[in-house]
Image (tube, helix red, strand yellow):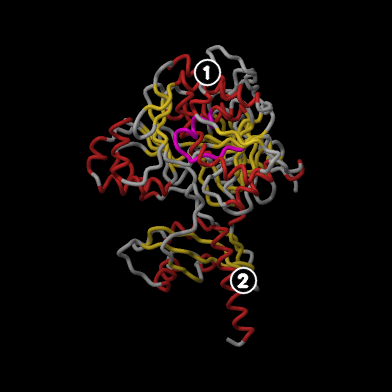
């Protein structure tokens, strides 16, 4: 395929990325500690658990302990902990010492074993309840280190235990795997610093800000906006998975969060909780709400802004380019249906179907990004299979820039449905079906067809008191879409399949449809 660069300027914004040793996450955190001192850093719903001064001591202690265990700067370690505030402390400490891969403790033993086999870590860092399980899974040749905050908080002030360099690997993130098998994105200290910088800059975070981090700490959403950005700004973060309105009210009263970032499924939960408990709305004083991980329905965005009284900023990030690739601004036009403009030190373009790299308004293609947040590459993937073209990261997302430089996403490139050479995005169909008053959630995917290649199918979750038939929804779509885009089937379900970060896993819907088709074919062939 031929690739040519558009001669116009590619959209860019913000500060230039520096190349000196200050461009590390550790340098950001140490500078934050100097400014913040004994101010709160890590909280839970009940209390302040670590100050910025504590975190510096803990990071120094963690580096010393890993070095004593034979773990070097470029070695890999896995982190498997329960997911509370202690996990955040351990994660921040580990990223200053080695390449850490936070794993979901809710994975099955076989899934954990697969992750460890792919990582080949020098050590596995665990909390006490996970130790026995991890020793059985890690094998005799891999050290299993029980990390507690008390054990790590032992390094004297001024300890210089080989601070990390900008290009040292520091974080290994398994991709979401919504459309294919998960890969492992390798992120450096420079990537982590740039990612935190972008969020701090967009939200203008400072020492007086407290984030409510309700996202998992094994995923970029819980790590970057939820943990690293507030800490580098000298502020604090409340690490708590919120399941009830009473828990949310406790956090509001004890920590007074000023902002939060979450996936749409969490926003929906927070809104429901706030509506059920008026005291939440009365006492909550948010100045910003941030949304990433999947598309935010315009209706939900409007409801959040109206009921919680804070601007909602839709943003865009990826495991391979974390923090923020783009974001709507805190001040200035926020365009619903877009993920905003390009972030500091980054550039965005699209790769069109004919192989052109361009930022021309309205050009649709695979979103490309380059800059300080972009990973060096996937772990264990040969150079010729890395997701880069002419120095740009291929995100796998389809989108287009408008005349103001705002990026609108329209689904995954591999999700594009090809029906008899007519190609369209599932997002187009989802947007129409979501307008039906009975529909709460919808996912559209391509189902195999023997002659057309694919045809659209939909999975729908209805509002609790709503009722509608498959035929009525298909007719609703037919009135608003070209014939080839209308779904041929609509399946009703109590919930859509999601990953642990809230993203809809279309791959599972496709697999379910293929299995259903195969069973029908078998019954037909068997005469049943």
Q: Seen in the image, is 313 located left or right of residue 246?
A: right
Asked whether residue 79 is drawn in magenta, I would say yes
**Percent coordinates x, y for residue 289 in the rendering:** 38, 37
Q: Seen in the image, is 263 located left or right of residue 508?
A: left
SS under mark 1? helix
Q: Seen in the image, is 199 located left or right of residue 23?
A: left
Q: Residues within 10 Å of mark 2 (few under 14, many from 20)?
A: few
Q: Nearer the viewer, residue 188 or 120?
A: 120
Check the image and report above or below for 75 versus 505: above
* Badge nearest the viewer, 2 or 1: 1
Asked whether residue 371 is drawn in magenta, I would say no
| Disc on the earlier residue, 2 or 1 | 1
Residue carrying label 2: 449
**Percent coordinates x, y for residue 68 in the rendering:** 65, 24
Check the image and report above or below for 467 versus 376: below
* Residue at the (53%, 51%) spot, across then down: 410
Q: CA distance from mark 2 to mark 1?
A: 57 Å
SS under mark 2? strand
Query: In the picture, residue 512 is in which quadrant?
Result: bottom right
Tell me if I can see residue 375 in this picture.
Answer: no
Q: Nearer the viewer, residue 505 or 391?
A: 505
Tell me if I can see residue 157 in this picture.
Answer: yes
Residue carrying label 1: 30
* Quadrant position of the C terminus in the picture: bottom right
Query: In the picture, residue 245 is in which quadrant?
Result: top left
* Residue at the (40%, 46%) spot, across then down: 266
**Percent coordinates x, y for residue 511 in the rendering:** 58, 64
**Percent coordinates x, y for residue 518 in the rendering:** 61, 74
Q: Which residues are magenta?
A: 78-92
């Amino acid at each position: 395929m031929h690739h040519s660069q558009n001669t116009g300027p590619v959209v860019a914004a913000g500060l230039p990325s520096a190349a000196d040793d200050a461009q590390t996450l550790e340098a950001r955190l140490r500078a934050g500690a100097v400014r913040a001192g004994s101010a709160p850093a890590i909280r839970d719903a009940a209390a302040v658990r670590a100050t910025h001064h504590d975190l510096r001591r803990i990071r120094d202690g963690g580096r010393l302990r890993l070095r004593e265990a034979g773990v070097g700067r470029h070695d890999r370690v896995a982190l498997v902990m329960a997911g509370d505030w202690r996990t955040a402390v351990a994660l921040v400490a580990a990223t200053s010492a080695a390449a850490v891969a936070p794993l979901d403790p809710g994975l099955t033993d076989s899934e954990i074993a697969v992750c460890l086999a792919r990582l080949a870590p020098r050590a596995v860092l665990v909390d006490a309840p996970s130790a026995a399980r991890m020793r059985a899974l890690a094998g005799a040749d891999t050290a299993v280190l029980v990390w507690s905050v008390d054990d790590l908080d032992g390094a004297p002030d001024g300890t210089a235990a080989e601070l990390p360099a900008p290009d040292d690997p520091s974080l290994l993130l398994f991709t979401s795997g919504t459309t294919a098998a998960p890969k492992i994105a390798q992120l450096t200290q420079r990537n982590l610093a740039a990612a935190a910088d972008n969020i701090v800059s967009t939200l203008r975070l400072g020492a007086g800000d407290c984030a409510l981090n309700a996202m998992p700490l094994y995923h970029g959403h819980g790590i970057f906006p939820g943990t690293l950005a507030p800490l580098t700004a000298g502020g604090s973060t409340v690490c708590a998975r919120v399941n009830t309105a009473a828990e949310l009210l406790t956090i509001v009263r004890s920590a007074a969060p000023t902002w939060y970032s979450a996936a749409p499924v969490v926003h929906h939960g927070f809104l429901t909780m706030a509506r059920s408990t008026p005291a939440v709305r009365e006492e909550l004083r948010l100045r910003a709400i941030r949304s990433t991980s999947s598309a935010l329905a315009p209706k939900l965005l409007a409801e959040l802004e109206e009921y919680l009284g804070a601007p909602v900023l839709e943003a865009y990030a990826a495991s391979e380019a974390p923090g923020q690739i783009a974001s709507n601004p805190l001040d200035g036009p926020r365009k619903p249906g877009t993920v905003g403009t390009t972030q500091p030190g980054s550039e965005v373009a699209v790769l069109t179907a004919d192989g052109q790299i361009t930022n021309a308004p309205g050009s649709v293609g695979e979103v490309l990004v380059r800059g300080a947040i972009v990973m060096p590459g996937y772990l264990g993937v040969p150079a010729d299979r890395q997701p880069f073209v002419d120095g740009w990261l291929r995100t796998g997302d389809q989108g287009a820039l408008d005349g103001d430089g705002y990026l609108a996403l329209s689904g995954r490139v591999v999700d594009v449905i090809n029906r008899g050479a007519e190609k369209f995005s599932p997002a187009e169909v989802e947007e129409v079906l979501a307008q039906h008053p009975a529909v709460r959630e919808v996912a559209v995917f391509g189902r195999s067809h023997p002659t057309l290649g694919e045809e659209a199918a939909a999975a729908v979750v209805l509002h609790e008191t709503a009722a509608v038939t498959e035929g009525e929804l298909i007719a609703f779509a037919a009135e608003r879409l070209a014939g080839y885009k209308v779904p041929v089937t609509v399946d009703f379900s109590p919930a859509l399949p999601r990953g642990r970060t809230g993203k809809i896993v279309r791959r599972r819907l496709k697999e379910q449809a293929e299995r259903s088709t195969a069973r029908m074919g078998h019954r037909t062939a068997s005469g049943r």
